[in-house]
């Protein structure tokens, strides 16, 4: 498990320590620093936690060190420190001017305390899905061999069709990546309306909460180095991705990652709500919460109150859901660094506070519609 991210002079944070839970959500308005913590994590990840880590790679592209050094601080030092299973590693530099000359687009390892094998273990059991994922495609090229592990779905979800076709051919792959139904019968991710525990059945069940009657079949054509998704809906079993809703293709890799990842794995998702209607966002939030409950660490950046409310629904209706699993970071604009509010969830699904201008926007809009007044009462 990734336990914490500590930042010094990284982008909009002069000094901040993010403690991570099994379910950690970053939210707030645009351009305030929600993505920064996830970017700080992705930089060493995309370079496989090496002695030097690239600022631009398969997971994120942040430019050069001049682009990431905090503009308000005169300190020449920058550091990203991670703690994974109690083992700390950090990357950065001590002298901005010297480093921008010798290594302008990478950071060097500053410290490593403890057994580094836990970091290599993490590389084999994580999924990272960017905000800009692949939407409807006629086919997906599978020639890229630069993958983190055999079940890698791709940062844009580009290998999801290939993975699903292979999982179908095995016919004995179940929720949580296990090989027998007995091993997953108590997994909280199992959809209550689907008795079949095979991974593809459960993917269809959760996808149907997003688009009624939808199903997906995936095919691999190795001789052409390509994979294809074909959708079914309401009796039509051969719909091209371009002929079903954009959000269906956009969210498929997320649903797959959440349902497949094994206990102890990590799923990192940027803007999972993109192109989904409110109900779809809410049910995706429910699946995210249940995935964390199953023992998979989920780290999410979102703008969606619907998705957050879906998480809260599980907190309210599932008596066995431990609210301590959940941490919400609300990020807002600050002067020298971004402001961070830590918001908790109680057993009734209630949040400890409601920052103005985000969670209460619907209430503000309805007040104006009902009264004709723009100024919402405090």
Image (cartoon, helix red, strand yellow):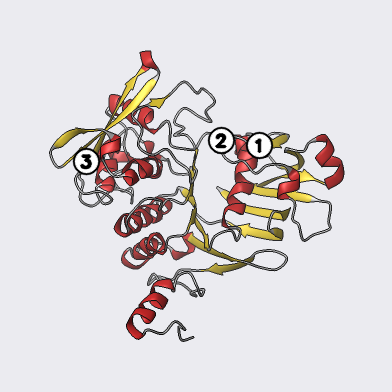
User: Where 85 falls versus 198 (above or below)?
Assistant: below
Residue at 52%, 28% (x, y): give it.
Answer: 147
The reply to whether callout 2 and callout 1 are in contact (CB within 8 Å) is yes
In the picture of the structure, the residue carrying the numbered disc 2 is 123
> What secondary structure is marked by label 2?
helix
Quick one: label 3 or label 2, which is nearer the N terminus?
Answer: 2
The reply to whether callout 3 and callout 1 are in contact (CB within 8 Å) is no
Residue 9 appears left or right of 334: right
Residue 352 appears left or right of 174: right
Q: Residue 262 location in percent, x, y?
A: 42, 40
User: Where 143 falls versus 358 (above or below)?
Assistant: above
Query: Can you tell which quarter of the image residue 122 is in?
Result: top right
In the picture of the structure, the residue carrying the numbered disc 1 is 49
In the picture of the structure, the residue carrying the numbered disc 3 is 196
Q: Residue 222 location in percent, x, y?
A: 37, 16
The reply to whether callout 3 and callout 2 are in contact (CB within 8 Å) is no
């Amino acid at each position: 498990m990734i336990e914490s991210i500590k930042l010094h002079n990284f982008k909009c944070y002069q000094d901040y320590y993010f403690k991570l839970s099994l379910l950690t959500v970053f939210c707030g308005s645009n351009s305030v620093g929600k993505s920064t913590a996830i970017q700080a994590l992705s930089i060493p990840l995309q370079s496989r936690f090496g002695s030097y880590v690239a600022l631009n790679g398969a997971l994120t592209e942040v430019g050069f060190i001049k682009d990431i050094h905090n503009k308000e601080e005169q300190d020449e030092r920058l550091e990203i420190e991670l703690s994974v299973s109690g083992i700390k590693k950090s990357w950065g530099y001590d002298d901005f001017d010297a480093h921008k000359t010798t290594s302008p687009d990478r950071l060097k390892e500053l410290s490593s305390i403890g057994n580094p094998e836990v970091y290599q273990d993490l590389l084999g059991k994580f999924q990272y899905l960017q905000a800009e994922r692949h939407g409807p495609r006629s086919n997906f090229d599978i020639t890229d061999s630069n993958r983190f592990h055999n079940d890698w779905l791709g940062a844009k979800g580009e290998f999801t069709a290939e993975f699903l076709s292979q999982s179908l051919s095995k016919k004995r792959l179940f929720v949580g990546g296990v090989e027998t139904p007995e091993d997953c019968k108590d997994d909280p991710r199992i959809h209550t309306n689907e008795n079949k525990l095979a991974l593809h059945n459960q993917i269809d069940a959760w996808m149907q909460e997003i688009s009624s009657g939808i199903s997906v079949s995936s095919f691999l054509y190795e001789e052409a180095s390509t994979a294809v998704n074909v959708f079914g809906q309401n009796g039509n079993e051969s719909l091209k991705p371009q002929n079903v809703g954009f959000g269906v293709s956009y969210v498929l890799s997320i649903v797959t990652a959440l349902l497949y990842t094994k206990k102890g794995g990590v799923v990192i998702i940027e803007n999972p709500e993109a192109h989904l209607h409110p109900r779809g966002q809410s049910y995706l939030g429910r699946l995210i919460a249940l995935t964390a409950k199953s023992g998979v660490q989920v780290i999410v950046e979102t703008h969606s109150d619907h998705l957050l409310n879906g998480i809260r629904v599980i907190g309210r209706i599932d008596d066995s859901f431990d609210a301590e699993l959940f941490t919400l970071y609300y990020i807002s604009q600050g002067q020298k660094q971004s402001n961070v509010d830590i918001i908790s969830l109680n057993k009734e699904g209630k949040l400890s506070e409601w920052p103005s201008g985000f969670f209460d926007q619907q209430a503000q809009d309805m007040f104006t519609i009902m009264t004709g007044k723009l100024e919402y009462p405090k």
